[in-house]
Amino acid sequence: MRINEVEQLVDITKKNIRFYEEQGLLNPARNEVNRYREYTEEDVAALQKIKLFRKLNVPISEIRRMQSEQLPLEDCLKRHIITLEREAKSVAEMKALCNEMIQQGEQFYQMDVNVYLQKMEQMEKGGIVFVDAKRADKKSRKKQAVVAGMIMIILMVIIIGLFAYCTWGLTEDPMPVGLFWGFSLPLIAVVAGVILVMRERMKEIERGEIYEATKY
């Protein structure tokens, strides 16, 4: 079946489905004639399992390990329960801190912030998490996108530089400038394309579209 049918069956968007393929959780066969993806009932069943565990906020890495039979379901769920209990404890402590500020009658411009920052520091030492994990992950994803893009751009620039050196530095009969640029334009187009892709990737990360694809 085609991806549109799978999208309707499982109620997962095409973008989500392709994301799971990129993550190695799904590997549909391709039609030998047109190279379109062809999904089977097994692929649909796999997506339903992925959707279930993503809704439970089980990490993709854990789902991948279960698929490869490196991690039993029971072990995964027991570990995930511990994570959820830790998160619940963090939420409870944050609620308690908020209630304390309310009971103290704190005002935004008059409150002694250092008192609460010190309390938070002590709570963090006890395992309470206040950091916005998504924000930290967003920064990490942006860094990865920039690094990958810069590697490609640098590679293209090096190739153009070597081409120029071989054209004018190693021969007494250099290639005409017009012909050189004719050969170089595809490489320059690749650089421009990488920059455009990087910009779009940054926008997707900033808008949170990556997180939408990882919800379930």
Image (tube, rainbow, N blue to C red):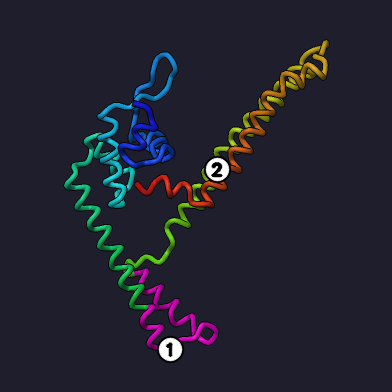
Figure check: 140 above or below 147: below
First to last magenta residue range? 98-125
> Is 134 above or below relative to 71?
below
Q: Residue at x 52, y 52 (%)?
A: 207
User: Horizontal placement of 18 versus 96: left or right?
Assistant: right
Q: Position of residue 208 (x, y in %)?
A: 48, 51
Where does residue 76 sit, x and y in percent of width and height?
22, 47
Please determine whether, in this image, residue 36 is positioned above or below residue 114.
above
Q: Which residue was labeled with disc 2?
A: 201
Crowding around mark 2 (Cα neighbors within 10 Å: few <14, some 14 to 19, many 20+) is some
How many other residues sit within 10 Å of disc 1, few (<14), some (14-19) or many (≥20)? few
Q: Residue at x 37, y 83 (%)?
A: 100
Residue 39 image-quadrant placement:
top left
Image x and y of residue 167, in percent: 76, 17
Amino acid type, mark 1: Gly
Reply yes or no: does residue 162 show up in magenta: no
Q: Position of residue 179 (x, y in %)?
A: 78, 16
Q: Residue furthest top?
A: 173
Between 6 and 79, which is closer to the camera in this rendering? 6
Residue designated by label 1: 105
Rounded to the nearest angstrom, the CA distance separating label 2 from label 1 is 44 Å
- Residue type (three-letter) at the residue carrying disc 2: Arg
Residue lying at 34% horizontally and 67% vertically, measured from the top left: 128
